Amino acid sequence: MPVNADIDETTAILMRARSFIESGWCRFTNAVDEAGNAVLPTSERAVAWCAWGALIAAKVPRLDYGAHPAICRLEDALDDYDITHFNDIQETVETVLAAFDRAIACTDRPIGRTGRWE
């Protein structure tokens, strides 16, 4: 997905993660292959991702998993639900995509538990 130069990196990561989920969604594991076997979210064999796995595949730095602005913005969009739990209790992908849409749109207020401004 091409990214407009005017889009900040956090928004770009959220958009990339959303595109992974839009192409394939799963629950109860970070990513699966065509046979439904669990694979790493960054694996070339991955065809479906959970919300957390999509963030990993979209290149959220490993050291920032707890505090990266993309994660904080998505948690804000989930009313501070745990991302994995939220993903796993959904019945359809539409609610997960809608959460990413809310996170992508939220660039003008404090983010997540850190209270930092985006």
Image: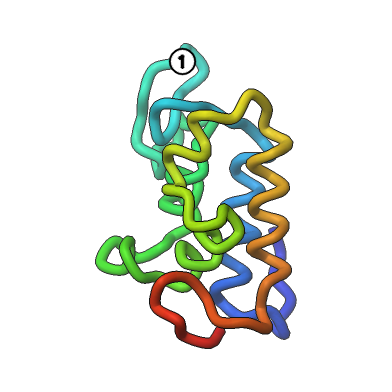
Give the residue at x 67% y 36%.
23
Q: Residues within 10 Å of mark 1 (few under 14, many from 20)?
A: few
Closer-to-camera residue (4/108):
108
Q: Amino acid at mark 1?
A: Gly
> Does residue 48 lie above or below 35 as drawn?
below
Residue occupying image coordinates x 55% and y 73%: 10
Q: Nearer the viewer, residue 41 or 117?
A: 117
Q: Residue at x 57, y 53 (%)?
A: 78
50 relative to 20 in the view: left or right:
left
Q: Is residue 58 left or right of residue 1?
A: left
Residue furthest to the front: 79
Quarter of image, res 105: bottom right
The image position of residue 14, as x and y in percent, is 59, 61
* Residue at position x 73%, y 36% in the image: 94
Q: Position of residue 39 (x, y in %)?
A: 36, 29
Residue occupied by mark 1: 36
In the rendered view, tell whether residue 85 sits above or below residue 68. Answer: above
- Residue 24: % across, % down: 62, 31
The N terminus lies in which quarter of the figure?
Answer: bottom right
Label 1 SS? loop
